[in-house]
Amino acid sequence: MYSEDSTADTEAAARIETALPLSFMIHQLSLKLAAQARAVIARHGDLTLPHWRVIRVIGMEAADGSTAIRKVLDFDKSQFSKTVNQLQARGLVAIADHPTDKRQFRLSLTPAGRDALDQLRPALDARQAFLMQALTPEEQAVIRSALVKLGQAAEITDFPTGKTP
Amino acid sequence: MYSEDSTADTEAAARIETALPLSFMIHQLSLKLAAQARAVIARHGDLTLPHWRVIRVIGMEAADGSTAIRKVLDFDKSQFSKTVNQLQARGLVAIADHPTDKRQFRLSLTPAGRDALDQLRPALDARQAFLMQALTPEEQAVIRSALVKLGQAAEITDFPTGKTP
DNA sequence: ACGATAAGGTTGACATCTCCACCTCATTGA
DNA sequence: TCAATGAGGTGGAGATGTCAACCTTATCGT
């Protein structure tokens, strides 16, 4: 049996990777993490990735307004609407009227939804710990603030450049 | 005029965000960076984001085998196939036989492809510089290695956990 | 040599994400 | 009070990403 990859191409890829822009690296990391999360979820339950994300945040019980939850996840409002309605149809999430804003809802987990969360959370928390463990203490200390700063910088579309029309 | 967001929900979102798993943060950052890149590309050309990524790497001229380029980008081979064929149809990329492997191709930019690259690269390089500038020197020093390590950790699907069946 | 195994590419089905138009409700300011 | 503006949610179209089946070609072990 030969190696997992054809070595020459993989080496060439590794060489180039060190010169790639940060945005490429983050995109690729995001794809890998999504694939890993799907693999874990598939082993311990049958949720899709966006379903899991929504349930995870509702389960934190730090907010219940639909808008607050949607903004935490940075979901597109269209996709969020569809995902939440699918979760309601599957009986995992309950939708109630919002006390002060008639446009939005209050979201909460049904008992079945909490079961799904409890079933998946240990594995995904272990994964989270595993990811952090892969970093040095110094990297662990700065990674979150770095990602937050990049997120803020990513929201600016007219940054300093000599060519913006 | 009132503020950009309804403040209460946004504040709640910000409060929760600090407790989100790393994988959520990276996913959201990736979405924001993609949106920013699309905005910049739309101002300076008419490529799609995957088209741009492929052209950017071919233009580095560090490799020309289709497999090497595909692995650098970590594209799914299906998506890569479709994207490259679209680029060829638009006359931006040339496809030639690979010298030693009849399964793959050699990829290169046509003059039109190089024009597209030259037209977009200044703006996107400026963006890259802007992103790095948002980080402290310490963060700049460790961010790449941290992302690489996370990428490696993300490729492992059976990490230590007490519940894997 | 030669069969077994696996990589590379293509295709089609499907999931996820983005964008736009539309409607309702909330907030602002005159 | 009320018109203007903007936020929240829905639905649909299209882009992007994922996955599985298939064929061809390359590599491995015998």
Image (tube, coloured by chain):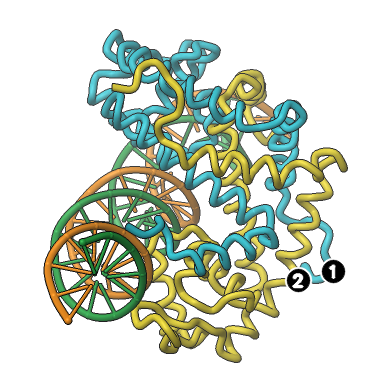
Chain colours: A cyan, B yellow, C orange, D green
Local SS, label 2 = helix
Specify few, some or many for label 2: CA neighbours under 10 Å numbering under 14, 14-19, or 20 or more.
Answer: some
Drawn side of residue A12 relative to residue B131, left or right: left
What residue appears at the point 51 percent right and 63 percent down from the top-left corner? A10
Bin the neighbour count of mark 1 within 10 Å (Cα to Cα): few under 14, some 14-19, many 20 and up: few
Nearer to me, A94 or A143: A143
Residue A152: image quadrant is top right
Chain assignment, label 1:
A
Q: Is residue B70 above or below residue B92?
A: above
Please name whichever residue, A133 or A25, is drawn nearer the observer in this view of the structure: A133
Residue type at numbered disc 1: Gly
- The residue tagged with tag 1: helix, strand or loop? loop
Asked if the residue at tag 1 contacts the one at tag 2, i.e. Cβ–Cβ closer than 8 Å, the answer is yes
Q: Residue at label 2? A: B122
Image point 45% across, 70% down: which residue?
B67
Please give the label number shown on residue A53: none
Residue A76 visible here: no
Q: Does residue B133 appear to the left or right of A67 in the view shown?
A: right
Q: CA distance from mark 2 to mark 1?
A: 9 Å
Which residue bears the numbered disc 1? A162
Q: Position of residue B121 (x, y in %)?
A: 70, 72
Q: Residue at x 35, y 83 (%)?
A: B102
